[in-house]
């Protein structure tokens, strides 16, 4: 088995040095050290404002596109959520009106990022969004919270589809030294049937093509079918350890262990950073494309002393705002997140060491998997 979490005191020392070097703190009191020493390792993270914890939103923002108008539209719809929870009705109304203005005055700017052959589909989505905005305005007037949640979710799903139409090619060249590994050049949706029920996960090859490609390849091979879950920390559930002495996937063609490199994309960078933790790279508190903010973040497990020793084992992060404040925590930049659970969080919450994967299958995006030539 791999244990994806490093020893706590090593984490705390790294965390303290990171904060001091970044200029965000001047020191750590003995009282703080005493507190952290009794807490789970992930509490050593530093919360960063109102970090995004919705997996669907994280996936939207991780898409490689540059269209400020559609991001404004998305932001207005996303912001409805926090305002609605606290019943700040004027803020809800303002966000809905702003979303409507983006559709009225910014539609041509949105369409400018969509290829000509996909523009009719994009126009259909924009019309559907206009209709949903009108319905949202009516639901706000009636103070119908349930209807607002439903319509907001539907509108954001349409925004996701619209943004996906803006990505017409893979955004960067994957280094040649990884040509022997499967690569996911896009996204794929995987359904995982467990003894507790179904999980639906979206894996993101735009941000982690090697890690996502490895996972999708193993799913298609049936590698995970029948494998058990296990827990070695309270806030993760792990799987992917095959029967027998091996701890990862042995390629039947080469008869060797398939080692997968650490792969982390920092927002604003042209491609992921490989084979080194962000700490060791001197990047502290970097804003990641795929952070550990969401319940059900998926990441490659690895030996604690080898960032490039992962293979088939992966873990789900059981995010808890009380234990692991959103923003930055000690796992960010140390493990490769390659996707999120988008449906079935209640199933994930119920998994234990007595459960197993019955079957995993790719239900969308299999065509994005590129096998080694």
Image: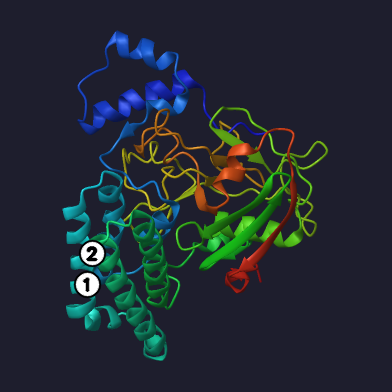
Vertically, is 60 above or below 275? below
Nearest to the observer: residue 324 or residue 91 = 91
| In the displayed structure image, the side of residue 83 where residue 316 appears, left or right | right
Where residue 250 appears, as percent x and y from the top left, is 76, 50
Identify the residue at horizontal 81%, vertical 40% (top origin).
Answer: 243
> Residue 100 has which mark?
1
The secondary structure type at the circle numbered 1 is helix
Nearest to the observer: residue 107 or residue 138 = 138
- CA separation, marks 1 and 2? 6 Å
Where residue 357 appears, as percent x and y from the top left, is 73, 47
Vertically, is 80 above or below 330? below
Tag 2 residue? 96
The secondary structure type at the circle numbered 2 is helix
Position of the N terminus by quadrant = top right
Q: Is residue 300 visible?
A: no
Pick out the residue farthest to the front: 142
């Amino acid at each position: 088995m791999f244990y994806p979490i490093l020893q706590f005191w090593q984490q705390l020392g790294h965390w303290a040095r990171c904060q001091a070097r970044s200029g965000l703190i001047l020191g750590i009191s003995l009282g703080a050290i005493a507190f952290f020493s009794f807490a789970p390792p992930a509490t050593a993270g530093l919360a960063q404002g109102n970090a995004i914890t919705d997996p669907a939103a994280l996936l939207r923002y991780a898409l490689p596109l540059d269209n400020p108008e559609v991001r404004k539209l998305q932001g207005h719809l996303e912001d409805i959520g926090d305002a609605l929870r606290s019943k700040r009705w004027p803020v809800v109304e303002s966000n809905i009106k702003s979303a409507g203005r983006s559709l009225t005055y910014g539609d041509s700017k949105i369409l400018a990022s969509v290829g000509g052959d996909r523009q009719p589909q994009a126009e259909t989505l924009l019309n559907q969004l206009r209709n949903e905005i009108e319905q949202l305005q009516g639901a706000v007037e009636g103070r119908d919270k349930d209807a607002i949640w439903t319509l907001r979710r539907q509108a954001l799903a349409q925004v996701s589809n619209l943004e996906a139409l803006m990505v017409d090619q893979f955004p960067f060249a994957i280094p040649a030294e990884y040509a022997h590994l499967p690569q996911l050049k896009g996204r794929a949706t995987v359904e995982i049937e467990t003894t507790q029920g179904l999980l639906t996960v979206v894996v993101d090859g735009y941000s982690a093509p090697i890690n996502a490609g490895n996972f999708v390849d193993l799913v298609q091979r049936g590698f995970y079918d029948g494998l058990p879950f296990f827990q070695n920390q309270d806030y993760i559930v792990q799987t992917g350890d095959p029967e027998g002495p091996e701890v990862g996937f042995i390629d039947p063609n080469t008869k060797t262990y398939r080692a997968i490199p650490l792969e982390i994309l920092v927002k604003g960078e042209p491609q992921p950073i490989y084979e080194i933790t962000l700490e060791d790279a001197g990047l502290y508190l970097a804003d990641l494309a795929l952070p550990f903010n969401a319940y059900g973040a998926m990441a490659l497990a690895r030996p604690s002393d080898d960032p490039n020793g992962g293979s088939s084992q992966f873990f789900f992060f059981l995010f808890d705002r009380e234990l692991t404040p959103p923003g930055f925590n000690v796992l960010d930049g140390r493990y490769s997140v390659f996707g999120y659970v988008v449906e079935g969080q209640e199933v994930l919450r119920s998994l234990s060491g007595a459960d197993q994967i019955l079957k995993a299958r790719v239900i969308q995006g299999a065509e994005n998997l590129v096998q080694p030539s």
